[in-house]
Amino acid sequence: MRTRTTQKQKPKPTALGKAVELLARQEQSSARLKEKLRQRDYGTEAIDAAIARLEERHYLNDEESCARQYQKLYEETAMSVRQIEQKLLTRGFPSSLVRASAPKDEDRDERERNAALRSLRSRFRAAAPMAKMKQFLYRRGFSYGTCDSATSAFLEENPELLLKENESYDE
């Protein structure tokens, strides 16, 4: 007859150990890291000590992290600048830091237009009304001028995708 062996439970890691584990998975803001540690029932003193230690060792730096994440999203995605800023705010970065991290790009309007065009190309492969396309972009944080310009350019490239007024649209 076999007896069931009891599994030994691992001891709860320290706040610093858990913080390092969370940072190993994904870069975090200090506010987001504090929030995650609080959710895991670590005390305020332990959390503050862990954050201080990580900052002291340069494993956690909100300014560099925010700038790096902003740059990556700006260069590699079809997100509007407003969308990028909102995403970084939800990741726990302060709004002043997010605004300061924005690239000083002289071609920002052109970048926004190209990002809007990429969004349209990925979303609209069948005919749709022009207004629907503009709404799609506007809801993603693009300015009205960018929506108008990108939609016009998209329809010049793909005139077959413009739905005439008397035709019906199915999503």
Image: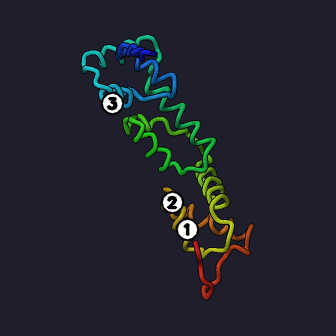
User: Does dot 2 land on a helix, a strand or a loop?
Assistant: loop
Furthest-front residue in view? Answer: 1
The earlier-in-sequence mark between 3 and 2 is 3
The circle on residue 143 is 2
Element marked by disc 3? helix
Q: Amino acid at mark 1?
A: Lys
Reading the image, the residue beneath label 3 is: 35
Q: Residue at x 38, y 12 (%)?
A: 53
In this rendering, the label closer to the viewer, 1 or 2: 1
Q: Is residue 55 visible?
A: no
Q: Residues within 10 Å of mark 3 (few under 14, many from 20)?
A: few
**Which residue is the extreme one toward the left?**
44
Q: Real-space Cα distance between discs 1 and 2?
A: 10 Å
Q: Quadrant of residue 3?
A: top left
Residue 62 is situated, as x and y percent measured from the top left of the image, at 43, 26
Residue kind at label 2, given as amino acid type: Ser
Q: Is residue 79 visible?
A: yes
Mark 3 or 1, nearer chain start: 3
Residue 49 place in picture, x, y as percent: 31, 14
Q: Position of residue 116 (x, y in %)?
A: 60, 57
